[in-house]
Amino acid sequence: MNKKIRIIIKKLSNPRVRRRLKIGLSVYSLVVILGLAFKLVYDIGYFNAQSLKNDKNAELPIAYPVLTIESAQRIVSGALKEDPTNPKTIVDQIIDNNHKLSTIIIENNKLKKIAWIIDMRLFFTGDLFNNEGYNLTEGIEHHHNINRGAY
């Protein structure tokens, strides 16, 4: 055992071996330091992104009002001045539940029609056009197989 240690020490005392050992250890330590630096930068960036995300979530209003079938039915009944407990016009489906402009399907006398609710309080059944002049009401009626009939 003692001889083996002496042989190892003798080999390590060679200047070529020392220089190669120094270079190898330097490269290895440089790789470890770079790895730790990248990990540290990644963690800092990740935690900054999470705190930014949390700050943005905190700035948002507590909750947007959600349009349900019941709330849409109240809005439609109020706009058409119908009895809310026994309405003639029934909200069949909510197509697009957006707090600014919601699209709904209403039914009256077995005729279905596309209607719109704006800002959770205004109701209308006319045609709605986008910036290019495309009739959104007609497109949604076609998509949901609703015939355009007299209402």
Image (cartoon, rainbow, N blue to C red):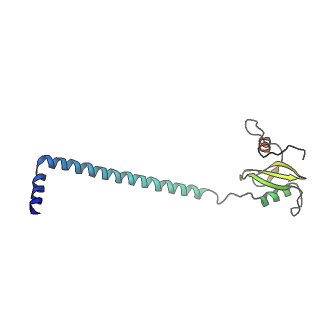
Q: Please tell me which residue lies in front, 56 or 83.
A: 83
User: Where does the image place residue 137, in percent across and percent down from the top left?
Assistant: 79, 43
Query: Residue 10's quadrant in the figure?
Result: bottom left
Q: Please tell me which residue lies in front, 44 or 18.
A: 18
For residue 142, above or below residue 56: above
User: Where does the image place residue 141, in percent across and percent down from the top left?
Assistant: 80, 44
Q: Please tell me which residue lies in front, 96 or 20.
A: 20
Hey, which residue is sitting farthest top in the picture? 132
In the image, taking residue 51 as reference, residue 40 lies left or right, namely left
Task: Name which residue lies at 85% across and 54% down.
Answer: 79
In the image, taking residue 37 as reference, residue 102 lies left or right, namely right
In the image, taking residue 21 as reference, residue 91 lies left or right, namely right
Task: Name which residue lies at 78% across and 58% down.
Answer: 69
Q: How many marks?
A: 0
User: Where does the image place residue 149, in percent across and percent down from the top left?
Assistant: 88, 44
Task: Name which residue lies at 52% across and 54% down.
Answer: 52
Query: Residue 57's quadrant in the figure?
Result: bottom right
